[in-house]
């Protein structure tokens, strides 16, 4: 992808940053430079001809015509290394670069570098005073660095230990301090042990943590229980792939953190579900429960303790020991559900016509916004119709590898889904795109479709397919992407040709329009749950 240049008038800011970095044209203030040893070049710094575009032929500094507010607006487009470099240009730019709005979010992930303790101490002291979100990545995190965060980052609310981030092992009886302002702490992708958090010096230092991500190696089982005693105000917790998490840990979590609203247990294969009765009864505000890949069985789902819950988001996909009987009983107790993922539940055998009819009759479908029933082998069109007729608020739908659901069946159901934004559909056998006029029906009934993922489709009549797609691109005001997953190469070619044609036509009519992205990725287009740690971090 071509790199975007930042030019105001005759002033090339990328060039300024590059020249200052290479030739040190202006005197540097030592306290404003990050002393790091770069391993790879920063791709945001250009090689330019030897010129000084910031100075005109009369020697006048052209930036004097720009207000501080405009320069600050321009600086928001630069990466942090370039900001550090151009801060050496002059006193005025140095002052603007220190504006706190430029340093609220700091991510060290885009660059590969070797970050020293001394370098991080200087960074924390000079640039992180107003930082609210800090993403550490590609670094070995020492206790000296944590101490720098504690002393200098007084506004820090989100601390992320990202990929290739390794936590130093504690040795001896060194004093451990931790920023008491942190509300979101994520350790899922980092290596090394975080047991030191159990011995933080200040009492109640971890009480502000509300959103927590624990990695597979963050704590052993005993220390995890000890750590949970120190974070009583947790609301969002993510234990993805933590094999040390068992039922006893969840009972302990419920007792110590009763305000839990979101709990992700994806891949925690040592949980069998005996803790859920205590969890549901104790955590009255639990809205999101993600149980993918767990070994829970029907006995867990038929318990009466599920009555009266406030669950809004449930993921029980790929749970191999659940059957239709367990689902039938479980789903009838969920009255507030908006998000339901049952993909490949019971190895594809748990979602049956009986389960779908129960969803319709119990009123569960009335509030649904997301329904994922991909890899459900035994459902038929009439049962699916019963659910979708009641799902007037449905925005996201996934159906794939249901042997008896064909393209013409989906055509008949589209009229019930006026709010649909994402549709992922494919059958076990190749389907023709214009079979049943699927695209034509979407054009007539769904105006807000954003993503259409078609799986295992082929081109049947090239001119007709081209016309259908061209019309879809022209009339669907919100369409952003069509994914032709495992489709014929001819159909992909037709889709791209139709997109190019529409781009030409809309340019001729000078209409404001963004192009539709044509992809062939093998990935789920359906959105994740709303109330999760990842959603909190991405805000």
Image (cartoon, helix red, strand yellow):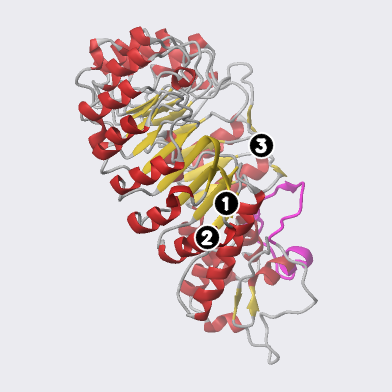
**Which of labels 1 and 3 is toward the front?**
1
Q: Secondary structure at mark 2?
A: helix
Q: Position of residue 376 (x, y in %)?
A: 45, 26
What residue is shown at x 63% (from left), y 66% (from top)?
4
Front residue of this view, candidates 482 and 335: 482
Q: Residues within 10 Å of mark 2 (few under 14, many from 20)?
A: some
Tell me which corner region of the image, top left, top right, bottom left or bottom right, holds residue 351.
Answer: top left
394, above or below 513, in the image: above
Position of the N terminus, as image quadrant, is bottom right
Mark 2 in CB contact with mark 1 (< 8 angstroms): yes
The stretch of residues the image draws in magenta is 19-44
What residue is shown at x 47% (from left), y 40% (from top)?
425
The residue identified by callout 1 is 460
Tell me: 100 left or right of 355: right
Q: Position of residue 81 (x, y in %)?
A: 65, 56
- Report, in whole angstroms, how far the alpha carbon at label 2 lies from the one at label 1: 8 Å
Marker disc for residue 139: 3
**Which of labels 2 and 3 is toward the front?**
2
């Amino acid at each position: 992808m071509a790199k975007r240049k930042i030019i105001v008038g005759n002033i090339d800011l990328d060039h300024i940053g590059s020249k200052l970095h290479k030739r040190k044209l202006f005197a540097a203030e030592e306290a404003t430079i990050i002393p790091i040893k770069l391993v790879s070049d920063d791709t945001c710094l250009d090689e330019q001809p030897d010129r000084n575009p910031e100075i005109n032929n009369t020697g006048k500094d052209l930036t004097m015509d720009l207000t501080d507010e405009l320069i600050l607006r321009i600086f928001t487009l630069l990466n942090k290394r370039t900001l550090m470099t151009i801060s050496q240009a002059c006193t005025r730019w140095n002052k603007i670069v220190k504006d706190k709005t430029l340093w609220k979010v700091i991510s060290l992930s885009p660059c590969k570098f070797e970050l020293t303790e001394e370098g991080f101490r200087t960074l924390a002291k000079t640039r992180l005073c107003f930082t609210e979100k800090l993403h550490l990545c590609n670094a070995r995190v020492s206790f000296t660095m944590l101490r720098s965060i504690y002393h200098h980052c007084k506004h820090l609310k989100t601390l992320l230990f990202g990929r290739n981030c390794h936590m130093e092992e504690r040795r001896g009886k060194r004093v451990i301090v931790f920023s008491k302002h942190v509300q979101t702490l994520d350790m899922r992708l980092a290596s090394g042990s975080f047991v030191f958090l159990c011995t933080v010096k200040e009492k109640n230092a971890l009480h502000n943590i509300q959103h927590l991500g624990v990695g597979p190696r963050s704590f052993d089982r005993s220390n995890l229980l000890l750590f949970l005693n120190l974070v009583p105000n947790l609301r969002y917790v993510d234990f993805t792939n933590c094999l040390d998490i068992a039922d006893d840990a969840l009972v302990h979590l419920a007792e110590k953190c009763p305000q839990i609203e979101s709990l992700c247990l994806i891949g925690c294969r040592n949980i069998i579900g005996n803790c859920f009765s205590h969890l549901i009864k104790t955590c009255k505000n639990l809205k999101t429960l993600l149980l993918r890949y767990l070994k829970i069985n029907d006995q867990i789902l038929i318990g009466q303790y599920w009555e009266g819950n406030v669950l809004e988001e449930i993921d029980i996909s790929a749970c191999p020991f659940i059957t239709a009987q367990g689902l039938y009983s479980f789903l009838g107790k969920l009255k507030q559900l908006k998000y339901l993922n049952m993909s490949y539940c019971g190895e594809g055998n748990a979602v049956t016509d009986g389960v779908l009819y129960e969803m319709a009759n119990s009123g569960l479908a009335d509030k649904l916004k997301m329904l994922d029933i991909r890899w459900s082998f035994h459902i038929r069109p009439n049962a699916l119709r019963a659910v979708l007729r009641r799902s007037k608020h449905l925005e996201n739908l996934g159906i794939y590898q249901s042997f008896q659901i064909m393209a013409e069946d989906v055509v008949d159901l589209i009229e019930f889904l006026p709010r649909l934004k994402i549709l992922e559909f494919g059958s076990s056998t190749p389907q023709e795109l214009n079979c049943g006029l699927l695209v034509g029906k979407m054009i007539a009934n769904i105006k807000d479709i954003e993503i259409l993922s078609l799986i295992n489709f082929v081109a049947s009549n090239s001119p007709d397919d081209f016309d259908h797609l061209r019309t879809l691109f022209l009339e669907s005001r919100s369409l952003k992407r069509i994914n032709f997953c495992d489709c014929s190469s001819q159909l992909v070619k037709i889709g791209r040709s139709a997109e190019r044609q529409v781009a030409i036509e809309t340019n001729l009519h000078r209409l404001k329009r963004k192009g539709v992205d044509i992809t062939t990725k093998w990935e789920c287009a359906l959105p994740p749950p709303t109330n999760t740690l990842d959603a909190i971090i991405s805000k």
